[in-house]
Image (cartoon, helix red, strand yellow):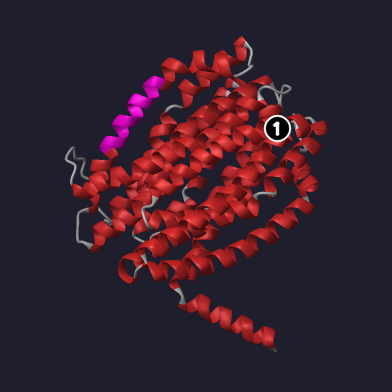
């Protein structure tokens, strides 16, 4: 009887709470949107296997994603509280976005040119790829550089749409990119090899950008006005976001460092690390994207209206619920990790002898699943407070700790040691961000 009463009470909350409804629906559509994208590495594994070419592609693609990840999370997340404030003040959202986009695009152009000039000599020093692999990495980087721009622009539109509480299309949009990417890879894989993967990602992201742009135009959410003028709110956003950009720069180095150190091991280690990471990203994305997007939007609005105490209460509730779910999911995935790896990669050109190694790397990643997800709750809270300095400091500490732990654990566990090091850094991140958040509220409360 108590169970029935609990279920009825929970269902009543779901129906009456817009936050819960939006969290559930956004998580569903985000999962649906990312689900097709999750399939891409599995198809790559089946179609291309574990080779020098796949090592080269995943390394090059990792560099492009690293550069993109410096900016696009800022555009999608940090910008939300600012847009919420612009809207509450009756300001021009389109002009604000236009001004920011001009500045960011100029920075991306300069950064892309620097990458093209320095990447080959740098990689020849820090990696142990042969000359042929290094040349292939450089070519793939050239082919995928447009991703840096379109990922950033798309994320800016997604963040602006989320700030208007239109969560479904931004959550679902990655599916359009992934479908286009898979179709291009399938039909052209025998013609261009791994180069077709780069082409697929780029064209897919362009399609995604156009879909979001058309949605903004059709719904008349705002009119983007490109502007070179920087007002007070733009300056504040650039100041606050600069810390987040630097933080993402430092944190984004982690997968690059991981792949670089994996290149020191036997051939195929970079690919194995990437394949296991793709498995890990499925549950991570399920809990850390849809829900977090909604929380950031709602918390930002409530913070400006109700103050810090409400933010603290909201954060604690979310932390309890998400943490319990994360622990449950991690336990299930660890138990079935070998079967999951076999189901995902046990076909085509993939070497079946690599399945146990992928499974072990996956398990070591999952060891840090709960602290990573819990840490994301604190990240959203810091973003609401525009406390990006804390995120920058945390990123610096994590990168240093990750290098040290990689070096130690690789000696005992090989490529799986890199995943274990990542899990330990997630634990550190959770502790650090939690302590800093409550200290900040205590000082300002």
Q: Residue furthest right?
A: 353
- Residue 186 appears in the rendering: no
Query: Quick check: 131 left or right of 92?
Result: right
Task: Note whether 263 is above or below 77 in the view shown.
Answer: above
Range covered by the magenta-colored residues:
102-114
Membership of 358 in magenta stretch: no
Task: Note whether 342 is above or below 185 in the view shown.
Answer: below
Task: Note whether 230 is above or below 288 in the view shown.
Answer: above
Q: Which residue is label 1 attached to?
A: 408
- Residue 170 appears in the rendering: yes
Q: Residue furthest bottom?
A: 1
Query: Quick check: 385 left or right of 349?
Result: left
Q: Quadrant of the C terminus?
A: bottom left
Membership of 111 in magenta stretch: yes
Nearest the camera: 133 or 378?
378
Query: Quick check: 295 left or right of 323?
Result: left
Nearest the camera: 77 or 43?
77
> Residue 67 in the image: x percent, y percent?
45, 32
> Residue 5 in the image: x percent, y percent?
63, 87
Rendered image quadrant of residue 267: top right
Rendered image quadrant of residue 52: top right
What's the magenta bit mostly, secondary-structure-wise?
helix
* Residue at the image point whose x is 56% and y is 79% from the top: 11
> Residue 78 in the image: x percent, y percent?
37, 50
């Amino acid at each position: 009887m108590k169970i029935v009463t609990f279920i009825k009470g929970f269902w009543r909350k779901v129906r009456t709470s817009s936050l819960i409804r939006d969290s559930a629906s956004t998580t569903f559509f985000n999962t649906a949107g990312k689900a097709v994208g999750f399939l891409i590495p599995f198809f790559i594994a089946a179609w291309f296997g574990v080779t020098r070419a796949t090592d080269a592609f995943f390394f090059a693609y990792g560099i492009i994603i690293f550069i993109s990840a410096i900016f696009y999370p800022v555009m999608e997340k940090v910008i939300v509280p600012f847009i919420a404030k612009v809207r509450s003040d009756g300001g021009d959202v389109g002009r604000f976005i236009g001004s920011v986009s001009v500045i960011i695009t100029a920075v991306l152009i300069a950064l892309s040119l620097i990458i093209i000039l320095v990447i080959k000599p740098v990689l020849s020093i820090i990696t142990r790829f042969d000359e042929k692999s290094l040349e292939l990495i450089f070519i793939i980087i050239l082919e995928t550089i447009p991703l840096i721009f379109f990922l950033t622009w798309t994320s800016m539109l997604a963040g602006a749409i989320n700030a208007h509480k239109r969560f479904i299309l931004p959550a679902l949009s990655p599916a359009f990119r992934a479908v286009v990417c898979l179709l291009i890879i399938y039909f052209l894989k025998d013609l261009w090899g791994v180069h077709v993967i780069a082409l697929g990602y780029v064209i897919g992201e362009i399609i995604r950008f156009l879909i979001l742009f058309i949605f903004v135009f059709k719904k008349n959410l705002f009119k983007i006005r490109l502007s070179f003028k920087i007002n007070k709110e733009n300056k504040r956003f650039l100041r606050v976001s600069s810390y987040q950009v630097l933080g993402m720069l430092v944190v984004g180095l982690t997968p690059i460092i991981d792949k670089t150190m994996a290149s020191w091991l036997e051939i195929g280690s970079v690919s194995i690390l990437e394949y296991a990471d793709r498995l890990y990203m499925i549950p991570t994305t399920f809990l850390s994207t849809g829900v977090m997007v909604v929380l950031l939007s709602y918390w930002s609005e409530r913070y400006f209206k109700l103050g810090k105490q409400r933010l603290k209460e909201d954060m604690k509730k979310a932390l309890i619920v998400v943490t319990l779910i994360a622990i449950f999911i991690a336990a299930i995935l660890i138990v079935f990790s070998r079967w999951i790896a076999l189901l995902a990669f046990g076909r085509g050109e993939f070497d079946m002898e690599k399945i146990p190694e992928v499974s072990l790397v996956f398990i070591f990643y999952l060891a840090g699943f709960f602290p990573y997800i819990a840490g994301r709750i604190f990240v959203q809270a810091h973003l609401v407070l525009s406390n990006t300095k804390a995120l920058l400091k945390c990123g610096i500490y994590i990168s240093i700790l990750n290098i040290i732990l990689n070096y130690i654990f690789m000696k005992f566990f090989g490529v799986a040691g890199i995943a274990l090091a990542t899990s330990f850094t997630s634990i550190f991140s959770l502790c650090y961000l939690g302590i800093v958040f409550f200290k900040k509220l205590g000082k300002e409360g």
